[in-house]
Image (tube, helix red, strand yellow):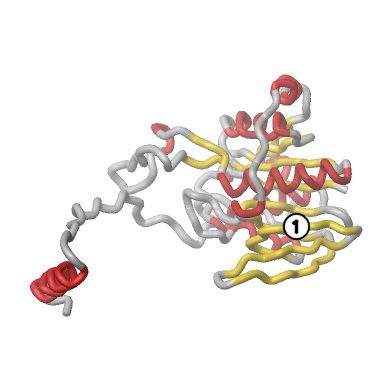
Amino acid sequence: MKVIVSIKQVPDTSGKVAVNPDGTLNRASMQTITNPDDMNALEAALKVKDATGCKVIVVTMGPAPAAGMLREALAMGADEAVLVSAREFGGSDTYATSQILAAAINKIGVEKDDIVMCGRQAIDGDTAQVRPQIAEKLGLPQVTYAADIKKDGDTVTVQRMLEDGYMTIKVQTPCLLTCIKELNNPRYMSIGGILGAYEKPLDTFDYEALKDDPLIDASTIGLKGSPTNIFKSFTPPQKGVGVMLEGSGKETCEELANILVSKHII
């Protein structure tokens, strides 16, 4: 049994988001981190490993520097890592990205007892589209927004978070789960884990390695194979300074009503 975890390197949006004149993100000038929800997926996989002794494989698509992020995942306890990187994959939208990642997971191999785990969504695109698309292209049952996961034999019971409660779903393996931050608290890397991370295998799948998969075609990957594109990215303008109303409840209500009337809101 193994758990395959799809993770992504994203810009650290807690700092200043740099935007190029053409409206695209200036990723070169920004610090990068592992997508937060993907860290929860990795922790969930490592907990399954702790309980069952299974193998955990992390996979990401990105440029060569993303290998550093994969080493961090290995230091946390993952057993193997795969970097999917090629010039032909550049400019892929969610559809094309899911084509490539599904092909990479196909190459790794998904067997009867396996689970594919991913974060709910990435903080850069924020679409939550890639992971469900991977499941569809692999023909796997999927459960999104997993807030609790319990594996029992060849089935997984998932507590799925909804806007107004929870839904409990039992799904048979192999399957794909998307994880949310409420699921767990990711562990830290240990000193031994950091030292051992450089002794664990880290493979690279380029275009040549994946080109024989039916999902990989010039018309469905990269910029040319992307049916959507980003028209513009920008930082929203800052909101104006708020106004604090002081006085009794009656006085502040009257003042607020007068302000709303003056602005023709009421």
Determine if residue 219 is in view: no
Q: Residue at label 1?
A: 149
Q: Is residue 199 above or below residue 63?
A: above
Name the foreground residue: 66 vs 221.
66
Name the foreground residue: 69 vs 184.
184
**Mark 1 is on which residue type?**
Ile
Q: Is residue 233 above or below residue 78?
A: below
Task: Give the percent coordinates (x, y) of residue 234.
Answer: 32, 50
Task: Give the percent coordinates (x, y) of residue 66.
Answer: 59, 34
Determine if residue 19 is in view: yes
Label 1 Cα crowd, 10 Å radius (few <14 / some 14-19 / many 20+): many
Q: Secondary structure at mark 1?
A: strand
Which residue: 19% across, 52% down? Answer: 241
Tell me the quarter of the picture where residue 260 sits: bottom left
165 with respect to 232 (left or right): right
155 with respect to 138 (left or right): right
Tell me the quarter of the picture where residue 255 sits: bottom left
Which residue: 60% across, 69% down? Answer: 162
Q: How many marks?
A: 1
Q: Residue furthest left?
A: 262
Which residue: 47% across, 49% down? Answer: 124
Task: Give the percent coordinates (x, y) of residue 140.
Answer: 76, 63
Q: Residue furthest right?
A: 153
- Quarter holding the C terminus? bottom left
